[in-house]
Image (spheres, rainbow, N blue to C red):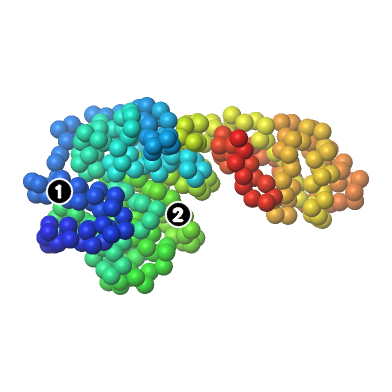
Amino acid sequence: MISTGLKESWVKSKFCRDDRTVCHTWLIFLQGVYVTGSFIKSSRSYDDYMNAIEVSHLSKRFGALTALDDISFSVSKGETFGFLGPNGAGKTTTIRILTGISAPSGGTAAIFGNDIIRNPILSRTQMGIVHETSNIYDDLTAWQNLMFTAELYTIGKHQREKQGMELLERFGLQERRYDKVRGFSKGMKRRLTLAMGLVNNPRLLFLDEPTSGLDVQSNLIIRDVIRDLAAQGVTVFLTTHNIEEANLTCDRVAIINRGHIAAIDSPERLKKTIQSAQSVEVAFDSAVPRRMEDLKRIPAVSEVRKEGDKFRLFTEDPSSVIPAVMEYAKANNLRVLSMTTAGPSLEDVFIKLTGLEIRARGVSTVD
């Protein structure tokens, strides 16, 4: 068993020089856990509350800058909830408030009925947090990192060893459990970080960009774990730049932009809000770029994008565009290799609601 003093010394040496906020959060956590030698338990049961997260009129200001402007939303128990937005939209600020790292300027946030500001320890004992930046200690082995995290939660020796072995096997790290983390790939470190976030069997898991920059294997493992957690009734709060990931894993999605909630709904319902993003995708046997200008002249086509060897024609009336494309192909001695119609994607919704416009030279903000 690692002593409380040693734990505090480790936290100070690990975080206090580089990240005072993380340092302060861990020390508060340790103090709350070890004042009585065990976790403080809530007097109410988990099932007494309808929502895992309840946010009401939340705001956060940094001087003249308003990062969050009167946002409200709730996340139901067992829901996988996606939180999407461009850089600077307010995603990280929201997570910092919900996990007790930062105090709001106004409004309230509750975790299973516990106000995160008034009862931070009660709230944190029910959550797991996986930050975008790794909190792994490189000079410890994977097993030592996992056991250290379990001891912070005062999990008994037998239980933490059993839980640790199950998690390492689940994330494909069992054979490397006695290797120092310094030699791990980014994907392996990310998997270990997620295992550490699950070691206390949280009822609510915060995942901040869990698959950012990962290899295919790690991406698939983490995505499967998210689905398994949902099946077990664990609430997952997911921030991501990977819109397709949110589309595949989330029950509902909130899109935040410039500190405001632009929309909250299921991915499919959000897609139905922009019928103008219906499209016809066509591939010719010759995909020279100049064909974009020709295709833009087709009546009812509002926009044309070249995507790989295909052209995507946006329209509110696909049925009139299809014969026009076939006529264009015939007139220019082209063979149509494939043609499909598609409804709006979650990415289309995101672009429309956040005011981002994709251009050939990159992404620019449209006011």
- Across and down, in percent, residue 249 comes to 46, 44
- Across and down, in percent, residue 333 comes to 90, 51
Residue at image coords 28%, 53%:
20
Label ID, residue 211: 2
**Whether residue 305 can be seen here:** yes
Q: Residue furthest front?
A: 64
Location of residue 218 with respect to 57 vertically, above or below: below
**Whether residue 203 can be seen here:** no
Secondary structure at badge 2 equals loop
First in sequence, mark 2 or 1: give its number: 1
- Across and down, in percent, residue 31 comes to 15, 48
- Apparent side of residue 134 relative to residue 365 in the rendered image (left or right): left
Q: Residue furthest left?
A: 36
Quadrant (top left, top right, bottom left, bottom right) of the C terminus? top right
Q: Which residue is mark 1?
A: 31
Location of residue 39 with respect to 320 vertically, above or below: below
Residue at image coords 34%, 70%:
182
Q: From mark 2 to mark 1, how far is it between C-alphas?
A: 32 Å
Give the crowd class for mark 2: few <14, some 14-19, many >=20 residues within 10 Å.
many
Nearer the viewer's eye, disc 2 or disc 1?
A: 1
- Across and down, in percent, residue 159 comes to 18, 56
Residue at image coords 79%, 38%:
322
Q: Give 80 or 13, whichever is nearer the viewer.
A: 13
Say which amino acid is labelled 2: Thr
Residue at image coords 43%, 45%:
239
Q: Give 255 or 259, whichever is nearer the viewer.
A: 259
- Apparent side of residue 135 relative to residue 71 in the rendered image (left or right): left
Say which amino acid is labelled 1: Gln
Secondary structure at badge 1 equals helix
Quadrant in which residue 47 is drawn:
top left
Q: Give 182 or 324, whichever is nearer the viewer.
A: 182
